[in-house]
Image (tube, rainbow, N blue to C red):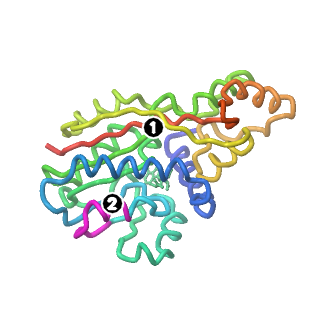
Amino acid sequence: MTERQHKQAVRSAFDRAAASYDSAAAVQREICHRLSGLAAAFPCASAPAKVLDAGCGTGYGLPLLAARCPAACLLALDFAPAMLTRLAANPAFADALPICGDLEALPLPAQSIDAVWSSLALQWCEPGLALGEIARVLRPGGMAWLATLGPDTLYELRDAFAAIDDADHVIRFHSPARWSEAAQQAGFEVLAADAPHTHALAPDLRRLLHDIKAIGAHSVGSGPRPALTRAAWRVLESRYEIHRRADGLLPATYHLVLLALRKR
Ligand SMILES: C[S@@+](CC[C@H](N)C(=O)[O-])C[C@H]1O[C@@H](n2cnc3c(N)ncnc32)[C@H](O)[C@@H]1O
């Protein structure tokens, strides 16, 4: 699969997931609140006039961003049109300006934005390209509050699938160090970098996979694959069982990469 085909496949997966996203996005909401805490700890030096939610999805982060930047004009960017259609249909987001565009080629002028917020979109991007674009559109001194995913994300699933075949069933995530390095190269000062783990929880593997698919984040990396046979599914389930917690739930790890950056 070429880079272009991969991006198109990711965009289509999020387009298809737009209707089900909100019903399954519990961890994604928790992460938005963590990002809001980071924005509170590392605010803009002066009241921002224009702020961007890059990879806004259905818009859960927008009110949190608005609360941090009360006087600002909000730009809500995503490359999946169906996500923006849902956002535009929600009267709560009537003040936000939806923009269909790619984080790796932002359709915005240089130095036109005071702060960028991005929650769980950057893991689909090449760090140097996306952070270079965020740096380009920010004014000097502008802030970026970013949440993306590190290599331990969904490791339980990756390990369980390894018992079945050699294919990549879970996308590969960049390390926290790679993100910090790319940020510095793009012209940012790294004010804070944290990499905590959090978990999605479900009673069984079928439900965990259902929720991952419902938010559009299932693997699209290695193209279409045949459905699992019953025997393969049984192996997958039994391998995943070793992670069952004392409270009876199955976890899926999300390894967060949280960054507060200031454009030099
Ligand atoms: C997991 S959702 C997160 C949505 C929202 N930020 C939230 O926290 O609920 C990821 C979003 O990023 C968008 N996205 C992924 N790659 C993108 C890119 N290169 N450019 C713009 N949007 C992108 C997807 O379409 C999807 O809506």
Picture coordinates of residue 149, whole percent (x, y)? 45, 37
Q: Can you tell which of label 2 and label 1 is closer to the viewer? A: 2
Using the rendered view, name the quadrant where residue 232 is placed. top right
Q: State the residue in front, 248 or 170.
A: 248
Query: Marks 2 and 1, Cα distance to the nearest angstrom?
Result: 20 Å
Counting from the top left corner in percent of width and height, residue 224 is at: 70, 41
Q: Residue furthest front?
A: 247
Residue 248, image x and y in percent? 70, 35
Judged left or right of residue 161, residue 172 is: left
Instruction: Locate residue 2 relative to residue 78 in the image: left or right.
Output: right
Q: Residues within 10 Å of mark 1 (few under 14, many from 20)?
A: many
Give the residue at x 54% y 44%.
6
| Amino acid identity at mark 1 | Leu
Label 2 sits on residue: 65
Q: Which residue is at a point 56% across and 53% down the rendered structure image?
A: 25
Magenta span contains residue 68: yes
- Screen quadrant of the N terminus: top right
Q: Tell me which residue sits at (67%, 43%) in the image.
A: 202
Q: Which residues are magenta?
A: 63-74
The outermost residue toward the right is 230
Circle 1 sits in a helix, a strand or a loop, which is it?
strand
- Residue positioned 27% across, 70% down in the render: 73
In this view, the residue in front, 195 or 75, is 195
Q: Is residue 37 above or below residue 83?
A: above
Q: Which residue is mark 1?
A: 149
Query: What secondary structure is marked by label 2?
Result: helix
- Whether label 2 lies within 8 Å of ligand 1 gets the answer no
Q: Amino acid at mark 2?
A: Leu
